[in-house]
Image (cartoon, coloured by chain):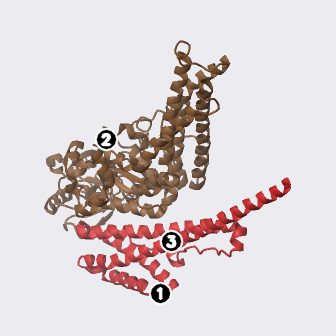
Amino acid sequence: MAISPVEQADFYTVEEKNNRRTALLIVLYLLLFCLCGLVLDTIYGFFPGIPVISVSVLAFAGVQTLISLNWGGELLARALGGRPLAHFREFRYRRALNVVREVSIAAGVPMPRVYVIPEPFPNAMVAGTRKDRACLCLTTGLILLMDRDELQGVVAHEFGHVLAGDMRLMTMMSALLGAIAILSEYLIRGVWVSGRRRVRLNRGIPIPLIAVGLLIGIASPFIGRIIAYSVSRFREYAADAAGARIIRNPGALAQALEKIGRYQGDLEGGYRAAAHMFFVDFYRGDANPTESAFANLTNTHPPLKRRIAILKKMAGEPVGDITRQRVEKAPVCPSCGARLKPLKAKTAYGLPLMLDQCERCGGIWFDKYELSAVGPGFHLEKLINVENFKKPSPYHKGPLVCPRCGVKLKAVRDPGLPKSIVLEHCPLCAGTWLNLEEVKTYIKWRRKKKVTHEALPEELFWTRAQWRKTPEKRFRRVPAKHEEENDIAGMIFRMLR
Amino acid sequence: MMAAQWIVIVVIAVALLWAVLTYNSLVRLKMRVQNAWKQIDVQLKRRYDLIPNLVEAVKGYMKHERETLEKVIEARNRAASTGNVRDKARAEGELTGLLGRLFALMENYPDLKANENVMELQEELTSTENRIAFARQFYNDMVMQYNTKQEVFPSSIIARMFNFKPADYFEAEEETKQAPRVDLKYS
């Protein structure tokens, strides 16, 4: 489906437009609620003139909301298996914490509590309903897969929610939704049952009014729900715009969304029920982009494609379709011109990595970051069948050409690498070409070097069960006592459990 | 009393209430602008503290880049010591450029990047650079709000009455406005 044109291009107007729409919908919502309650009160009317039922249901919803307002966020994070990010000492976690602090400065919001949720897929959410007590959750997948800028984008989106007070709004919405459900239940049951049971209708209520009441009772939960969904969708657009404004970099957010859109891995997760609160809803819509009008009506998140399109417009970048595979010229070997075949490799701790190897000479093309990402656990030796390869033939007379961009490669020596390795480096895409001899030398050198900073923390690859049973102490960076004092949410959580 | 008198009283009361609220919100914005300015200083201080550590850590590796390292330290000292706002701003701008250059140079030393200590320092410094930039951006956002409130009718009446002055934007020095020329890796 084609993306309908996006008129607005700057984030201020996008944010404002969505805020206006939201306000309108909230008014609608409250009207619906009042209508429900008043009709019920008119029909039953325990105390004529006083809307007892409406008031009491509203009060119940209010109390419920208040409880979740104060502790909700951190308790939810804990319930999802979250651990405070500050407890992790590994490089990437520290960087993530730094990014959150940066964005909080940009947004002018106090530093939130940050939790890590042990899920392999990249996602984030913000919970807790007060601006000064927000609770930000990042999945391990997010921390692992995003680079610094993209992480900034995702975090900024979440801060967009914080600035707009969306968590409180959605909590109130769901409480109201519950209240409406209760009211409509009474309405339907009351009219149905009143003929035989002792619950009586007030006298003198015209039949048409009863009929209307019944209709409203049946329809209002559905209508309420649809309104709630569309409010949620507008909030996502608004948070995207706000996030772009906070870091002044809509491109980073678009890039993060694209990366998430391409995620093909494990989706099994413990948080299905809370999926609507996250950055991207993997379970609906976003994961299976059915764009029928009905599917959109019942989704809490707008389609990824549209979010990306709007952000790219802001960034002034061309809008492409991420779901369709890019049709590229098949990459050819810079040395021989033969086809490059995909080669499966692994990084340290076993993250899959897709390299490109020449069918003929066995040289390997490493895209940006891939060369340093292949850690000591890089099992290439087994994969390369050395005997089958021939000496590279002179394909181009002149300098080698990048298989991705068609730009001339530059030969450089890296002072940190063995002298015999000459990197053929693409200045445009930052990929690197190594011939077979160099690859072999490189592997040997890597093996000797053991650990590099690119090695990923092993807990990123734990199963959920492994994660849960590992005591928190293992990650502690600061003395436990110091943290325990502030960890009230953890205390409550343990008590509840 | 006549209805007209009541109307007059109500109108005056509303006007007074509005004046008080507007005045308060102007004061609040002014405070926020000041706070935002202080936040920049906090981050700059962090930068002064981190730079010597980083330079010390990389010195052993980057023997050929002694000149750059010395320049970084020099700019840092100048920025940290001068009280003059304009000189300070210039030194800060220079420092930003030099740090960008230093980071780019560090890319050439994979050994250096494998050093955990250096990596961490670099990350901290990168983060600090971002925080400085964001703190300035936030300051300018606040100044925009404050100044807009002073200019927009009707709050402009109150602003003029109590002599509120528009705050100054933070502006990058002309020379730093052009992206710092960084010798890129492999070029």
Give the residue pinned by disc 3: B35
Chain A as rendered: colour: brown
Of residues B63 and A431, the one drawn nearer to the viewer in this rendering: B63
Q: Amino acid at mark 1?
A: Gly
Q: Residues within 10 Å of mark 3 (few under 14, many from 20)?
A: few
Same chain for the residues under marks 3 and 2 in the image: no
Question: Which mark is in front, 3 or 1?
Answer: 3
Give the residue pinned by disc 1: B83
Q: Chain under label 3?
A: B
* The C terminus of chain A, quarter of image: top left
Residue A25 horizontal side relative to residue A100, left or right: right
Contact between marks 3 and 1 (CB within 8 A): the answer is no
Marks 1 and 2, how far apart in space? 55 Å
State the residue at coordinates (46%, 46%).
A66
Q: Amino acid at mark 2?
A: Gly
Marks 3 and 1, how far apart in space? 19 Å
State the residue at coordinates (54%, 74%).
B170
x and y, in percent, of residue A115 in the image: 33, 53
x and y, in percent, of residue B102 in the image: 35, 74
